[in-house]
Amino acid sequence: MRNHEGFGVGLMEANTVGRDRIDRALATIRDHLDMEVAYLSEFVGDQSVFRAVDAPGFEELAHVGRSLSLDDVYCRHIIEGRLPELIPDTSANSFAAAMPITQAVPIGSHMSLPIRRPDGTIYGMFCCLSSKPNVSLNERDLNTMKVFADLVSEQVHSDLEQEKDLREKRSRVETALEAKAFKPVYQPIWDMLSGQPLGFEALCRFESEPYRSPDLWFNEAADTGLALALELSALEQALELAAELPEPLYLSLNASPQTVLSGELEKLLHAHRRDRLVIEITEHAPVDDYQLLVDALDRLRAEGVRIAIDDAGAGYSSLQHIVRLRPDIIKLDMSLTRNIDTDPALRSLASALIHFSRETGALIVAEGIETEGELAMLKMLGVYGGQGYHLARPAPREQALALVENLKPAQTRVA
Ligand code: G
Ligand code: MN
């Protein structure tokens, strides 16, 4: 279930764009100065760790992740003034010549500049070296290198900021997951003809101060590799209502394609009457491989689960989505519902989808009905089901159950 284990938000994992930029800066300056090795290092404790390297043919010597003691390399001596930033010939510098690493590598020429964090502390070094002396290297070359070092240092700052941001997000989501600081609420979905409830959609609400919308939580979970864990945990809680719903009411659950593809959803649904469950495919990003998703949905369908396309008409929930996933239910996004009674363009669009649904055997459920006018228009257009604040707000389990309890046996609600 926890596909995120071992997920490390490191500088280089956090930002591949940033990494590319740094790699290009290293390659360009190395080539320009005609040196063999260029690298960016980070000081971690008393080690210098290679974070980005451009060293064709010298990968053994310099590769990302390799670390060397700060006592053995030039870096700290340069920062503390024992070695200069520019060394065209190490044999001409007695301090450099006496260091074991100079013969071991060997280092013939060396240029290195510190990379500082915004607070002035040292992040690491931006460095070029060659096995042979390069006596043409001069102050002008060092100045050119400074321009590149400045660019790299800006990139490092922004990557570090992003990394910090991700770490905060991740720990926020982890804390919510551990404390299960969220609970389901249930919004009834009504039969537009009879005015009776058809079922409930489970929605997740987070207990946090200040209030943060479920979208925000799920986006943060997605950014930090915790989306599957969070969705499964929310689904597990939402499913608690399933066994308590009187026949033939169904429970509608939101799941992203990634969760459907994980295989974990099937396991979670196994203990329940699958013919009373609907999975709403919620989508915030393009689907990479429709065939894989169709196959996973077919496995759920084979068990009796019905499939709905959520937010149809908005975002990535495109017509393509509807055509390829062949849903049992199409949920009209609330942007189509809003003002449908006064906007002819919305009305024709909804009509087209209703026509499509009839042809393909799907049912239309309109979301976000907020006024009597919208409700009346959607009924007139022949929409099968509807939900929205005008009919009922999402409510905790007890209230949801009380609603259907009250409806029996009189069943008098008029929608
Ligand atoms: O994306 P999805 O359709 O699953 O999410 C529906 C969201 O819209 C929920 O957060 C729910 O609380 C909210 N919602 C439900 N009914 C209405 C409504 O009538 N108006 C508005 N603005 N939001 C609604
Ligand atoms: Mn939904």
Image (cartoon, rainbow, N blue to C red):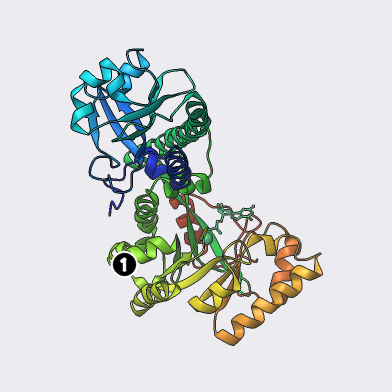
Residue found 39% across the figure and 73% down from its top: 292
Is residue 273 or residue 153 the one in the foreground?
153
Horizontal side of 387 relative to 146 (left or right) equals: right
Residue found 60% across the figure and 62% down from its top: 387
Horizontal side of 14 relative to 266 (left or right) equals: right
Residue 404 lies, in percent from the top left, at: 49, 61
Asked whether residue 209 appears in the rendered view, the answer is: no
Is residue 20 or residue 348 the one in the foreground?
20
Horizontal side of 165 relative to 271 (left or right) equals: right
Total numbered labels placed on residues in the image: 1
Is residue 221 or residue 393 the one in the foreground?
221
- The correct choice, above or below, for 310 with respect to 402 in the image is below
Asked whether residue 88 appears in the rendered view, the answer is: yes
Residue found 76% across the figure and 63% down from its top: 373
Quadrant of the rendering where the C terminus is positioned: bottom right
Residue 62 lies, in percent from the top left, at: 27, 40
Local crowd size for mark 1, using a 10 Å CA cut-off: few (<14), some (14–19), many (≥20): some
Residue 348 lies, in percent from the top left, at: 75, 75
Horizontal side of 49 relative to 215 (left or right) equals: left
Q: Which residue is mark 1?
A: 266
Query: Element at badge 1?
Result: helix
Quadrant of the rendering where the N terminus is positioned: bottom left
Q: Quadrant of residue 110?
A: top left
Q: Amino acid at mark 1?
A: Glu
Residue found 30% across the figure and 41% down from its top: 64
Residue 214 lies, in percent from the top left, at: 50, 47
